[in-house]
Amino acid sequence: MRLIDQQYLQEPCYGVCRVWEWLQKDKGYKVNIKRIRRLYQLMGLEAIGPKPNTSKPAPGHNKVYPYLLRNFAITYSNEVWATDLTYVSMQKRVSVPDSRRAR
C-alpha cells in the first residue's frame, strides 16, 4: 500500500492497470490486478482523468448559441472571419503591450 500511495502522489493520473504494470515491471512484484483494484478502493484512490459522458451538458445549463450565418450567403473571400481564443498556461506571467491603449 505504501508503494501504491507513493506512486499515486507522483502520478495521480495512473489508474489500476498502470500501477499494476509499474509494480510488475519496474518493482518486480508478482501481484494480481484485482488486488490493486481492491487496494485502490480501500484507500479511496481514483485516477485523475476525463470521466464518461463528458460531452453531455451539465444539468441546468440550457444556453444554446445560435448559428449567426444560417441565412447569409458568403459570396467572396474574407467576407466572414472566425477566431479561436485558447488559454495557454505559462509558468511566469508575460505582459503583452496593447497597441490600442491611449498614451
Image: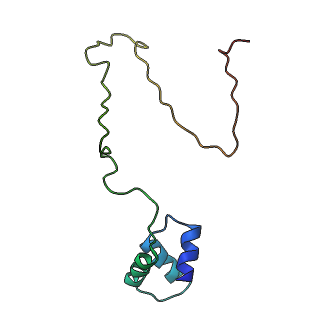
Residue in front for this viewpoint, 29 or 5? 5
Q: Is residue 15 shown left or right of residue 55?
A: right
Q: From the viewer's side, name the closer residue of 82 and 97.
A: 97
Residue 69 or residue 51, whichever sits in front: 51
The residue lying furthest to the bottom in this view is: 30
Q: Residue at image x 67%, y 21%?
A: 98
Q: Quadrant of residue 82?
A: top left
Residue 66 at least partly seen: yes
Residue at the (45%, 87%) spot, across then down: 31
x and y percentages locating residue 87 in the rendered image: 54, 38
Q: How is the image coloured?
A: rainbow
Give how far across and how far down residue 38 sits, in percent: 39, 81
Residue 26 visible in the snapshot: no
52 left or right of 14? left
Q: Residue furthest left?
A: 71
Q: Is residue 52 above or below residue 41?
A: above
Seen as rendered, the residue at the extreme top is 75
Residue most extreme to the right: 103
* Residue 28 position by quadrant: bottom right
Residue 2, how many percent across, how many down?
Answer: 56, 82
Q: Quadrant of the C terminus?
A: top right
Q: How many marks?
A: 0
61, above or below 25, in the image: above
Q: Position of residue 27 (x, y in %)?
A: 56, 83
Which residue is painted at 58% across and 75% down in the image?
6
Q: Is residue 78 above or below residue 91?
A: above
Q: In the picture, residue 17 is in which quadrant?
A: bottom left
